[in-house]
Image (cartoon, grey):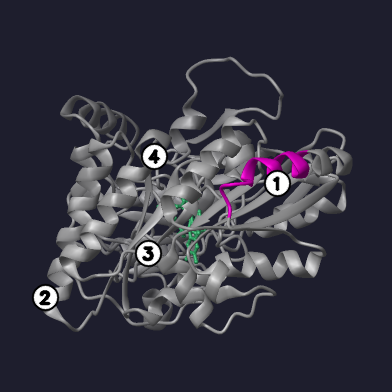
Amino acid sequence: MSLTNPTEELLAALGADVVILDEAARFGASFDNARLSFMPEALVRPRDEDDVAKVLALANRHSVPVTPRGAGSATTGAASPLKGGWVLDMSGWKNLHIDSDAGLAYVQPGVVTADINAEAEKLGWCYPPDPSSHKYCTIGGNIACNAGGMRAAKYGVTRDFVMALEGFLPTGEWVRWGADLRKYASGYNLRDLWIGSEGTLGVITGAVLKLLPKPEARATFLMSFSNEKVALEASRAIIGARLNPSIMEFLDRQSVRCTLDEGLVLPFDTETVFAPALLLVELDGAADAIDLAAGRLEALMKGRAVAFRRAKSVDEAELLWSVRRKCSKAMFRIADGKLNEDIVIPPRSQDALIDFTLELKERTGLATPIFGHAADGNFHVHIMYRRRVAEECALAEKAVAELMGKVVELGGAISGEHGIGLSKTPFLRLQHSEAEIGAMLAIKRALDPRGILNPGKIFEPFRVWEHEIVRVTLPWD
Ligand SMILES: Cc1cc2nc3c(=O)[nH]c(=O)nc-3n(C[C@H](O)[C@H](O)[C@H](O)COP(=O)(O)OP(=O)(O)OC[C@H]3O[C@@H](n4cnc5c(N)ncnc54)[C@H](O)[C@@H]3O)c2cc1C
């Protein structure tokens, strides 16, 4: 019997345990945290590398789109199967081995990021990249998006920890980039090309990650400032004083207000002192070095901060961090629509960004809360709007376009950690010249001649606003 339908051929080759056609399962894999749904023809859960090779061979033969997937927590639509086809779900690949003598972690792509650090810490090591989604997202998705996190300030992003990658080219050939060696200088560095390529250049089936010694101690500080510009000037002073914080998070007054309105009770007079703008700082290292640095930090903040608090216990530190952890969700107190743009801005342009967002708020009437990673300039600028009010949707769409234009004008970047996916495609040409995009597309064509791997992402302009957002509750909501 000849099988003409590629999905039937895949099913016959791999079986119903691997090739899942059930509608509810396919729907679950049809969107990510951007909530833009595109139904795949099949959800494929490969058991091993042979299965991955077969999927890609068949996809190439029949030009079927294949979208690799981890936990589906991408905020840009990167993991949604825009052109249908098959979703290649790697979240079940969970092997994790730590070689303590070498300070390396050997991981499969489905390992949840927080588990890597938890296992490393048991052996006195740590894996610093800590996206806020670390309890859900997978290392495969982190590598594909080059995920950042709060500790990127001191330690860097996912890319800085990936020593080797293995997996499949879109054509179905197995490759290994880099090695589990501390030094490697052989051939082109295609490992770094895969990192951040959003599942468009290869399927990751394994990685070797570098670990660092776990810091001996950590200390948390909360400081409040009379306004956002004073807080940001203080953050620049901390960097200039070479205090090298492991985390330095900024919250503007709109973000702080939302969090406090959620009922969070801090051990301070929140009305008079803590409502304006905040910095949350973590120092890590040897205990005596932290005490020394804490003294320098407090002295530096004199005349700048309205209040300065060092957490007295682990519980109090947790309480202070909960301001930051809760603010993203708390923003839905303002409106049920939120656009979260993870822009990056150089230190010299921080004041201009604050002026711009306040002016935007004033002009459009839409709230524009900002929080984010002050040490590396990666701020999450939000545009809040009511989804059922057509004028507000139109205003929000325009506001995002203005924001992106401004960010590039200020010498910044349209994304610091979430990537382009679908939602940022309209702005790619603000950031890159035609020559740059042409070079990227030439690489894509060379590695994926049939254009089967995660097609439509990064390069094809997509209008989010013309697409219905699915209303679902996700594990991280
Ligand atoms: C509440 C929340 C907080 C977040 N905080 C942060 C943050 O602080 N920092 C940050 O950087 N991001 C953050 N994110 C975004 C998201 O969690 C990250 O982008 C994460 O890296 C995605 O991992 P995932 O396993 O969910 O991947 P998915 O969403 O499933 O996939 C993301 C991309 O990776 C590709 N991909 C997945 N697995 C593979 C594989 N094995 N081989 C090839 N390509 C693959 C997919 O095709 C897709 O393009 C947050 C998201 C949420 C919902």
Range covered by the magenta-colored residues: 293-305
Give the vertical position of 79 relative to 206 (above or below): below
Frontmost of labels 1 and 4 is 1
Cα distance between the residues tagged 1 and 4: 48 Å
Frontmost of labels 4 and 3 is 3
Secondary structure at badge 2 equals helix
Which three-letter amino acid code belongs to the residue tagged 2? Glu
Q: Earlier in the sequence, mark 4 or mark 3?
A: 4
Q: Earlier in the sequence, mark 1 or mark 4?
A: 4
Is label 1's Cβ within 8 Å of ligand 1? no
From the image, tell me which residue sits under label 3. Answer: 369
User: Which disc is residue 391 wearing?
Assistant: 2
Is 214 positioned to the left or the right of 12 in the image?
right
Cα distance between the residues tagged 2 and 4: 39 Å
User: Which disc is residue 201 wearing?
Assistant: 4
User: Which disc is residue 298 wearing?
Assistant: 1
Is 290 positioned to the left or the right of 443 in the image?
right
Residue 1 place in picture, x, y as percent: 32, 65
